[in-house]
Every structure is written in structure tokens, then in C-alpha cells.
Amino acid sequence: MFINCFTVDVEDWFHVCGISGVPQVPPGQWRVYDNTLRLLDLFAELDIRGTFFMLGSVAFARPELASEIAARGHEVASHGYSHKLVHELTPDQFRQELVRTGDLIASQTGKAPRGFRAPQWSLGGRTPWAFEILAAEGYLYDSSCTPLPFVGDSKGSLTPYQLATAAGNLWEIPPLVTPGRFVNLPSGGGWGLRLLPTKTILKGMDNAHSAGNPAVLFLHPRDVDPDGPRLPLSPLKSFAAYGTRSDATPVLRTLARTGKCIPLGEMVDSWRFVS
């Protein structure tokens, strides 16, 4: 049976990395709660059980959201607290964010998070210390290393693998890409999910399935909110963060039909059992 892992980075429209002067948006203007509920309803309709990487600041502001996600049968994992790039943090700051977010998730869902995803794929060669901290804090897997140029390592692995650290082993689970003529294409989410032809995304999923691996896709709550607000960004940043801002619902309906959709943590458990 083919396996898909749909993941959601639970953040809002103003959570954009690498820019200064981000406005302090009052919680009353946040859209993450309603948009995440839309995704939850869609996932229920499509029989998707997924992984929601919860930003700690969102969990703090809307404690009922993580509880609702877990109550609907999904995994709640960590997306850090502040949405800062990992290489902008010291090791101690990274650990503090990890612990703070983990404590919030555990108190709201009854389960400590077992997976982590860094904002904007910012965990990798510049932050080798972060993997050991994750393992030391009891995390089983990370999904932060993308085999893409600019935001990741274009020569990185396309398939899941284990990392050995001084604190223990950690599974690394990259998001789906489709190899192109010159570079890998981000077919697993972001602007790729919004703009690439559906057949290109399906090709990437078929490649993963044929190799016996899950197809790991990623979304944001704003992907089902095409009329939501935007930050005033440079054209390149705006394209990466918002793109054409079309509603991702139609393509999700197509992709969900290609296999069984389970959380990343459940996938990792099956690997641990076999090994």
C-alpha cells in the first residue's frame, strides 16, 4: 500500500522568515485558527490523518487549537516557538524554544511532541548541533532538511535516513521533491504545490512510492485562505510566501487519493518496529 504523509506548519500569514520590521499583529487579527479548522474539516473529508507542526507562539495564544488537532486523530509536533531561523539562535536558545513549545503541546494534548520541523528548512549544515539537541530532548524524527537549492541542500537525500548523534539516533524525513532537468522541484508544498502542474507533483509521489517511501507533503493554513492578508515583501519573498495564493483544496483532493494518509510519527514507528 502506498503511504502519504500530509504535514501542516501551523503558523499565520505574517510568519515569514528572514525579514525585519514584521508588525505585531494582535491575536484578534490572526487567521491561523479558522484556517486550521478548515484544513481539519478537509482532512476529515479526505480521510487524511496528518502531522501538524505547531508553532509555540500559536499554541500559547490559542491553546484550544492543539487540543482540537489531537482530538481529531492527528499528530501534533513542534515547529519551534518564535519562528526564527535555527541558525539565528544559539544552541541554548534553540533548546529553550524546543522545551517551551514541547511543554505547551504536552499540556494541551497529553502527549509530548516526537517530531520537529524548523522554520524555512533552516536546520542542516549550518546547525549540526541542533540534531544532537533534538535527540537529547527525546525527539524521534526531524523533517527540516530539504533537497532544494537556496533553502536547503540541493544534493541532499530525497529519501528518509537515520542520523547518529552523541545523544542517540534521529530519523531525518525530507519533504517530497520531483527531480527536474536542472534542479529538484518543490512538488511537496509551498509555491510548488500552488503552481506546478498536478502531473509533476504526482510524478514525485510516484517516485517516492516506487522506492517504498512515503510521499511527504507540506501545507500552511494560509494555503486554504487565498483572500487572506499579506505582508509587503519583495517580489521574490512574496512569491515564496504567498505565490498566486490559489486555494489548495482541489489539488489536495487529487493527491489524497494516491495512497493511505498517516502521520509521520506513525510512519517512524513502523520503521522502528521493523528495524
Image: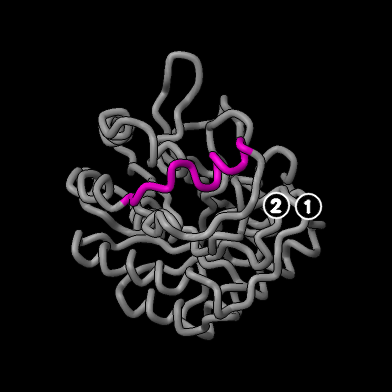
Camera-side residue of 175 and 213: 175
Residue 222 point in image, percent of width and height = 45, 58
Name the residue that disc number 2 marks.
85
- Does the rendering let one see residue 104? no
Q: Is residue 1 left or right of residue 70?
A: left
Instruction: Tell me the amino acid under the disc marked 2.
Output: Leu
Question: Which segment is the magenta one?
Answer: 235-248
What residue do we see at 67% from left, 72% from top?
99
Camera-side residue of 172 and 39: 39
Rendered image quadrant of residue 186: top left
Task: Give the answer, above or below, for where 195 lies relative to 60.
Answer: above
State the quadrant of the N terminus.
Answer: top left
Q: Of the numbered discs in the image, which one, if any, rests on residue 100?
A: none
Packing grade of label 2 (10 A; few <14, some 14-19, many >=20) is some
Name the residue that disc number 1 marks.
88
Camera-side residue of 138 and 89: 89
What residue do we see at 36% from left, 32% from top?
196
Tags 2 and 1 touching, CB below 8 Å? yes
- Residue farthest to the top, as pictured: 181
Q: Secondary structure at mark 1?
A: helix
What is the CA distance from the residue labelled 2 to the residue labelled 1?
5 Å
Is 86 in the magenta? no
